[in-house]
Image: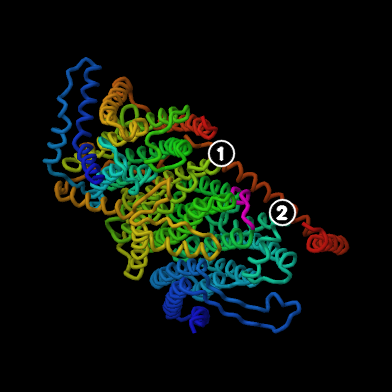
Amino acid sequence: MNIIFMAINLAFALLIAPVVDSFEMKIRARLQNRQGPSILQTWWDLIKLFKRPTVEPQDSVKSFYKLAPYVTFTAVLTAYLIVPTLLPSSINFIGDFIVVVYLLGLATLSFVIGAFSSGNAYAQIGSNREVSLFMSEELLLAFIVGTIAVIGKSLSFDQLFPLPLRISSVLALLLLLLVIYVASARLPFDIAEAEPEIIEGPLIEYSGKHLGLLEYSMFLKRLLLYSLLLNFILPVQNPTRLIGYLLGIMILSVIYSTFEAYYGRFRIDQAVKLMKKLSAVALVVWIIALVGW
Amino acid sequence: METQMLLIPVGILIIAAVVGLSKAKMALKIVSTLSAIASVVMIYIGVLGFRTTLELKYSLFNSSSLFATLNWLVFRVDSLSAFFLLLLGILSLCASVYGIKYMEKYLGKEDMRIYTFNYPIFLLTMYLVLICWNLLWFILFWELMSLFSQFLVAFEQSEEKAVKAAFKYFCMTKAGAEFLVLAVVLIILKATSFNADYSEIANILPAYLSAHPGMLYALTFALLIGFGVKAAMIPFHSWLPDAHPEAPSNVSALLSGIMIKLPIYMLLRFFISFFPLEPEIGLIIAVFGVLTLFFSMMYALLQEDSKRLLAFSSIDNIGYILLPMGAGIYFLANGDQLLGSVALAAALFHTMNHAFFKGLLFLTAGSVMYETGTRDLNYLGSLAKKMPLTAFAALIGSLAIAGMPPLNGFVSKWMIYISTLSSPATSLFGIIAIFISAVTLGAFVKYFTAIFTKPAVKEIDAKEVPLLMSAPQIVLALLCIAFGVYPFVPLKMISQALGSIGVPLASLVVYPSLVVPKTGGYSPIIVFAFLLVSTLIAFLLIPSKGSVVSTWKTGRSEDLNVSMPADAYYRDFKEAFNEVYLLGDASKDIVQKVTKIGKVLGTKFEVLSYDLDSMLSLAMILIVILVALLGGVSL
């Protein structure tokens, strides 16, 4: 029963993640008075990429370069065993909050190692920024994880979903909302891939199937983080959960793509400093949680 | 008969040291082989130690006078020493085999006897520290261990840096050991009435110290300094980043992998079985652990020397061991058996993990040095194509130390977070540990990519290292994977080891997962299997086969000549967290000023020492203070 639920959740994520991206493209287009592409456009793009051959740059370390996109993809996919999407899941022995955080770390790491292995100077600069941003983002995330652990007195999702309604939990989730935005490589935080300056950075040498896999994993990562946030809010065993979840995904998409449509890109140092300031805010939230509010 | 086994490594290593006195070229091979054999015996003893307690007793003087405490030389292996013996055995086996080829590089350049004589003696003293069961003998072996490891650090006599580093290391550990001597003398004289046997002390001391809190804190202070220096706990760490890189790489692997864990072993003995459990002591240790891991890793990020980066990360890992140890003592003292035992198990698990991956990483840094002759991360680059096996081993080591699932580093880090994060008192420690874990990832992305994947400044001539050097690396890498995917074997040993010092370990293992009830769960097997299977399926569905094309150079035909040296990594991050470095540098300045004052005072003292009268009166005052301390003034 539970395994079937898990399979459905996984299939849902695999199917819907690109659709969410097209949906966001559409919203951005509407905000800029454009028509926007079809809701399946991202899927068509991915299928096109998966049909194309790949290339291996001469200076690359081939084994790492070729393996990295696959590991990035499956690391994100593994996190879906732990975070339920469409249907609630009661399997909690596969992993907890920490495992999800580290699986996303594994995805980032393998992405970066692949880019460094491509032998291209722009990829090096881009991945370097990616790691800098990752480290500072993790400071904020660590405070959020700590705050949530103090509120729920646990790290296991069956204790944490949903969080009790308190000042500290609302503030912690607001911060989580921000971290998700940063972690999903959107404007103004797409610093690593900055197209105009360093020509897609880590992605510069990747093409065809590899590029498709990496983009697919980014869409999956975004949907995973949306689901994580929503799970903290939605009631677990309730028929309204399904509707709430789907509605929640749409609302988050609208919020995030609106932000994205109106911003230019940050410089990497601005982004790192912003993370540091937000971490100070998170420290205050953590103290509020300790007090018990 | 089985207990006589304990003497076999002693015999083999003494023979090895005697052989090592010869100047013949063969000596290196014989010494390395003998050390490897002794290591295998140590592993066997470690395995035996988990089944039964081995004990050997010798009455040396048959007198009950002054030497009464030294009279009994007792060797005893219980589960805790067996656990550390296993680590020592595995690591010294790898390091000894590795040394056969690696040390050949120095033949003719340096006096090989410094290595061939001191190396087996160094192994022997570490072994004796682990099996001895008497505090006075322990101090003796401990000091010998510092002495002989110091000679190994100074192996490259022609390098001024190495000799200086060895001297600094010796002075600091010697000063630390004086605190230990004081603590041991206090214990023997005041509490246990001339008894230094571990079992006796464990019987008498807890009750005595509960009645004398002043003595408890004085001893804690002395022990934390004494063992803290040896374990390189901040602020007593400054010898390590100098000493460990200067030693030959296989010795660095031993120094970082196991020698700095011996203070951890003794701290566990003292604070858990000899001392009453006090929450304050636990918190003090945890705070030192957090300071250690935070500052050392932030500084590791700056390093441009491969072995120096690894050395800073060794300090960081000591922090990751001290933090759960302190938290564990805190929880146990407060009556939380579950989290307490999980935290202590995390400390031991991380000790094991660090032995494996840091040993591995030092060996890979050694292989790179062997082929290229340099440790400069700015200069090195793109060695992965030329040294694929070493690159693979280094990648596994880097992934493991960054705590990536499903490798072994993740299991211990997960246990640390699970035990600390959800309790208010230790929550902040866990938060900082998560952040520093991300910084570790950054530092090891730098270590790995700077050596193996980034384009080199100029073409480097290198090839894969010989089998005798790559095999130990692969063995350690496989251990990192095996104990990450299947952590149940080491966890069983750890629960037995903790049981032998009186900590009941609530079973974590709910097959196929590790579960701490109501707090968290992690199933390494399922995560690993899913990662593997889904990667394979992705490979089958979307096979990637491509043609080789030249790297994109913005459309120009010649090379871009853009490359990122190691010092350019994470510049923005470093700038944003500049306060940390300012703080670190400020404290460095203070220490340097104190050293200067010490030097001035030292000179004044030397001048004074020519004056016999004042010297004598000073000595008398000191003796009076000492007598008062030891006898009259009750602490």
Q: Which mark is residue B582?
A: 1
Q: Name the front one of labels 2 and 1.
A: 2
Q: Which mark is residue B200?
A: none
- Which subunit holds the residue at mark 1? B
| Image height of B128 relative to B508, above or below | below
Contact? badges 2 and 1 (CB < 8 Å): no
What type is the residue that disc 2 sits on? Pro
Q: Nearer the viewer, residue B285 or B110?
A: B285
Q: Pointer 1: residues within 10 angstroms few (<14), some, or many (20+)?
A: few
What type is the residue that disc 1 sits on? Leu
> Is disc 2 in the same subunit as disc 1?
yes
| Image height of B526 relative to B570, above or below | below
Q: Secondary structure at mark 2?
A: helix
What's the residue at 44%, 30% (across, down)? A169
* Residue A146, image x, y percentages: 46, 39
What's the residue at 48%, 73% (across, down)? B49
Residue B360, quarter of the rendered image: bottom left
* Residue B283, image x, y percentages: 59, 48
Please indicate whether residue B136 sits to the left or right of residue B300 in the image: right
Q: How far apart in space, not on screen, are marks 2 and 1 (Cα)?
A: 38 Å
Question: Does the magenta portion include B554?
Answer: no
Please indicate whether residue B578 sits to the left or right of residue A256 in the image: right
Q: Which residues are magenta?
A: B276-283
Q: Which mark is residue B213?
A: 2
* Residue B316, image x, y percentages: 50, 51
Residue A88 visible from this viewpoint: yes
Q: Nearer the viewer, residue B611 or A33?
A: A33
Q: Secondary structure at mark 1?
A: helix
Please indicate whether residue A264 sits to the left or right of residue B160 in the image: left
Earlier residue among tags 2 and 1: 2
What's the residue at 21%, 26% (across, down)? A23
Residue B16 visible from this viewpoint: no
